[in-house]
Amino acid sequence: MASAQKLLLEGVSDAVCFMLGALAGYGLGQAVDIDIFSDGYSGSSMVGILMVGLGGGAGLHLARIWRHRQKSKAALEEAEAD
């Protein structure tokens, strides 16, 4: 795979997994009745913002773990083919 394709895959997978994680954090906050868009910076809205940030970070981390496993799997298959 060309270098540009690898970089595109990395960027897209990072972005998609970050967004899915952030949406999961937002959804979890909504499930426990935390509104991040409430007026002012109340304690509950700050916790909701934190949940969205942590969810996005977790999604990004999972994307990197997934890419690392894919890379390791490809290297193992290549080594077995030789």
Image (spheres, rainbow, N blue to C red):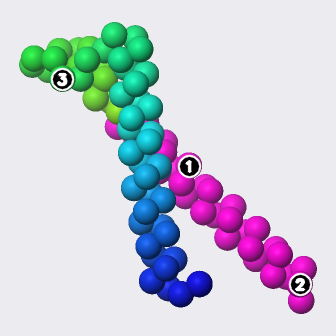
Quarter of the image where the N terminus is located:
bottom right
Is residue 57 visible in the rendered structure shown here? Answer: no
In x, y percent, where is residue 24? Answer: 44, 32
In x, y percent, where is residue 70? Answer: 68, 65
Q: Is residue 35 above or below residue 15?
A: above
What's the magenta region? 53-82
Q: Mark 1 falls on what kind of element? A: helix
Q: Is residue 21 above or below residue 1?
A: above
In x, y percent, where is residue 66? Answer: 62, 56
Q: Earlier in the sequence, mark 1 or mark 2?
A: 1
Q: Please state which amino acid type lies under the numbered disc 2.
A: Ala
Q: Please state which amino acid type lies under the numbered disc 3.
A: Phe
Q: Is residue 73 above or below residue 53?
A: below
Quarter of the image where the C terminus is located:
bottom right
Q: How many marks?
A: 3
* Residue 37's disc number: 3
Name the residue: 76% across, 68% down. 73
Side (left or right) of 29 relative to 78: left
Q: Mark 3 falls on what kind of element? A: loop
* Residue 14's disc number: none
Q: Earlier in the sequence, mark 3 or mark 1?
A: 3
Q: Residue under circle 1?
A: 62
Name the residue: 44% across, 42% down. 20
Q: Residue under circle 2?
A: 81
Name the residue: 43% across, 36% down. 55
Q: Earlier in the sequence, mark 3 or mark 2?
A: 3
Is residue 71 visible in the rendered structure shown here? Answer: yes
